[in-house]
Image (cartoon, rainbow, N blue to C red):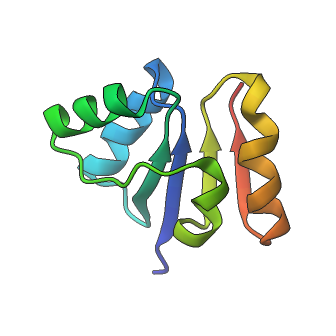
């Protein structure tokens, strides 16, 4: 079974639930990275939750992931979607 590498854009209420579920294990999916507006706050949360996940800028998602899931403000939608789509990758928009 192929594994889909997932990047999460935004670690607010929805992104955190998603990150937790992926870190706990969903067959066929793996948490490959995340982006957050406040990286220090996000890193503190990831550490407290014992989730190993690199924090990167959304423009780096194509190098890490096959699918980006957007859980961020609409104002950053293009920064998340454009690099992934131009790289032939997939995006799921939740906002």
Extreme-top residue of the structure: 13
Horizontal side of 66 relative to 84 (left or right) equals left
Q: Nearer the viewer, residue 34 or 3?
A: 34
Q: Where, quadrant-wise, is the N terminus in this rendering?
A: bottom left
On the image, which quarter does residue 93 sit in?
A: top right
Q: Which residue does the image show at 76% across and 59% down from the upper left?
A: 83
Horizontal side of residue 83 vs 33, given as left or right? right
Residue 26 screen position, x and y as percent: 36, 55
Residue drawn at (38%, 40%) of the image: 19
Percent from the top left, x then y, of residue 32?
Answer: 43, 60
Is the residue 71 above or below the residue 19 in the image? above
Extreme-bottom residue of the structure = 1
- Left or right of residue 85, residue 76 in this image: left
Name above or below for residue 13 compared with residue 22. above
- The total of numbered circles placed on residues is 0
Who is closer to the viewer here, 38 or 19? 38
- Quarter-of-image position of residue 42: top left
- In which quadrant of the rendered image does the C terminus lie? top right
Query: Where in the figure is residue 36, as x and y percent of width and height?
Result: 49, 34
Picture coordinates of residue 69 (x, y %)?
61, 44
The residue shown at (23%, 31%) is 44
Q: Give the residue drawn at x 67%, y 55%.
A: 59
């Amino acid at each position: 079974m192929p594994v889909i590498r997932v990047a999460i854009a935004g670690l607010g209420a929805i992104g955190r639930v998603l990150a937790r579920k992926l870190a706990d294990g969903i067959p066929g999916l793996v948490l490959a990275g995340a982006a957050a507006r406040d990286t220090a706050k996000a890193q503190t949360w990831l550490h407290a939750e014992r989730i190993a996940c690199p924090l990167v800028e959304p423009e780096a998602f194509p190098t890490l992931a096959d699918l980006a899931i957007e859980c961020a403000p609409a104002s950053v939608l293009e920064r998340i979607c454009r690099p992934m789509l131009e790289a032939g990758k997939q995006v799921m928009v939740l906002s």
